[in-house]
Image (cartoon, rainbow, N blue to C red):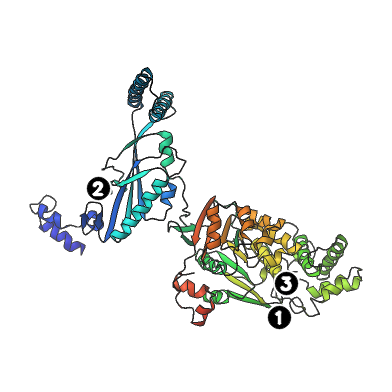
Amino acid sequence: MRSRVRALWYRAGGPGGAAAPRFAPGERTAADLVAPSAVEERRDQVHIDGELSRVLALHDYPRHVSPDWLGRVIDSGEPLDLSLHLEPLDSGEAISALTQRLVALQSSRLWDARGGRIAPAGREVAYEDAERLRDALERGDERVFSGGLYLRLRARSPEELDRATERVRGTFSGMMAGARAALYEMWPALLSCLPAGQDHLGRRRNLDTSSAATMIPFSSSQLAVERGLLYGENVHNSSLVILDPFSAEHENANKVVFAKSGAGKSFACKVEALRALLLGIEYVVIDPEGEYGRLAEAAGGRVVRLTGSEPCPINPFELPRAGVGGDVLASRVLALHGLLGLMLAEPGQSLGRAERGVLDEALYECYRRCGITTDPATHGRPAPLMRDLLRVLREREEPHGLASRLSRYVEGSLGRLFSEGGGGGPGGPGGPFVVFDSSGLEEELRPLATYLVADHVWERSGHDPRPRMLLVDEAWSLMRRPEGARFLSELARRARKRWLGLTTVTQDVGDFLHSPEGRTVLGQSSLQLLMRQDASAVAAVEETFGLSSAERAFLLAARRGEGLLLARGNRVALRIEASPYEYELCTTDPADLARGAGAPGEEGNR
């Protein structure tokens, strides 16, 4: 093809040939590729390839403004382009003009004073403003700019364009400003809104540096980075919310999700898990309701079902084999203290010092009998089991009744879970997506399973560092136990050191926020997702997060899949959007499951 074109080119006489002027119009240029097929200019709008545009120019500026006062317009949700043209002016000419203006105003003041008339308030304000600006220019504190502000609105029909225009003008009117359509000048107005940065309309206003600075939108409710997870869509302006939880811009990758039942928190977490896998983030889920099984199987993950009738695949006594410094044996004994505290302490209490002392000696004795000492060379030997600890406690005949309490988890009604070893520890269940399904466990055993899995993930992160997320669903079941609450708060504090992110999900917001450990987990979480709240719990949420009245109302009336995301100092009203295939895998709606998880209904992909 290239040789044929080259032959035509030389046959036509080459670059300097006589046929060159006739050949040039037949070439396709970049302008041909980007130019619209037709442009129709009307009195108050421009029609370009089926889309209507109208440009508004700001003509009345508010007297008092705050920084980023245009943010209300940007985040209004209207499809618009905002163009701000600023051109510096010569300060000397501005000072001269202000001096002449002051002379004219002072003459008017003297004339009224001689006639005994009261000076108009508007003239006095203008005199003070001109005098203050001239003094600031003389000192070099301010500069003068010529500014123009234009907004291009887009719509598919004239009616929709008129409604958008009225909404934007109403927003400006609420700020004591005014915007008008550039009647009969829509084409130069449209050119003024293009990225070329040229003002063809010329609707200008002189501004000082401070006033011009307030017009630049330094911040908005948009929250997006170049690479990260797509969390959803901004409710206000339909922009995408994209974040990388493991970015250096965040203190850590921890996240808390607070929502009432039915608000869509499980759906949001499932969509996030799917998208995290695309970025190479390993995902581990502690699932108390058995909701993640279909998702894990479809994503090529692994489902580990924890039941009271089968042994747990994780042996809590297992030691890491490599990659972890310090006294590994002592660290493992401390972790076992936390697990045994959940198992043996009375509800709402902790083990006493004497009981901990007995357990400490018994644990070291268990490892010694297996030939394991503080020497790392012995750590590859088979680890003891829970029944070995029970045997040691019975032999010691300790007076605290620890053996009788532990026997229930080894030989009694709850014995199958801990009676045998499953080759756990760091060598236990692993992979890019692992779901620990604890829905088959008794209520009493679920906090133990949560602790066991979380400890397993922590140890695995130590010897196999990579971006990894641990999701603890219904975390309140572990937080209501003192040992579990301390463990979870410590995990949230230290997870960053092992490239681990902790996501805690709960609907029991009050109990979570009123415990010191719960507030520690919250304080150590860079991301917070607040979804629909119950009226009885919203007061605690409002006080903790400092919500405004509008944010409180939004959380009380939020639809399924909507929430408030707090990240990087921003607060974004978020809507979780999923593709049809994601919806099919993540939905838990019984109606969708009954008909084979078909396409979502009118409420969208939530």
Q: Position of residue 503 (x, y in %)?
A: 61, 62
Name which residue type carries label 2.
Answer: Leu
Q: Kindly identify which numbered label has been placed on residue 315.
A: 3
Q: Nearer the viewer, residue 576 or 426?
A: 576
Where residue 6 sits: x, y (%)? 17, 59
Check contact, mark 2 vs mark 1: CB within 8 A.
no
Quick check: marks 3 and 2 in contact, CB under 8 Å?
A: no
Q: Do we see residue 247 in this rendering?
A: no
Q: Position of residue 200 (x, y in %)?
A: 26, 43
Using a 10 Å C-alpha cutoff, classify the residue at mark 3 as few (fewer than 14 neighbours), some (14 to 19) or many (20 or more): many
Amino acid at circle 1: Glu
- Residue toward you, 246 or 483: 483
The answer to whether residue 5 is above or below residue 312 is above
Residue at image x 78%, y 70%?
Answer: 343
Give the secondary structure at mark 2.
loop
Number of marks present in the image shown: 3
Which residue position holds label 2? 183
| Among numbered discs 3 and 2, the one appearing first in the sequence | 2
Q: Quick one: 426 or 56, which is closer to the camera?
A: 56
Of the numbered discs 2 and 1, the one sitting upstream in the chain is 2
Residue at 38% from the left image edge and 23% from the top image edge: 117
Which is closer to the viewer, label 2 or label 1? 2
Quarter-of-image position of residue 353: bottom right
- Three-letter amino acid code at disc 3? Asn
Residue named by callout 1? 310
Position of residue 474 relative to residue 139, above or below, is below
Q: Position of residue 363 (x, y in %)?
A: 82, 67
Task: State the image quarter where residue 525 is shown.
Answer: bottom right
Alpha-carbon distance for marks 3 and 2?
Answer: 77 Å
Q: Are marks 3 and 1 in contact (CB under 8 Å)?
A: no
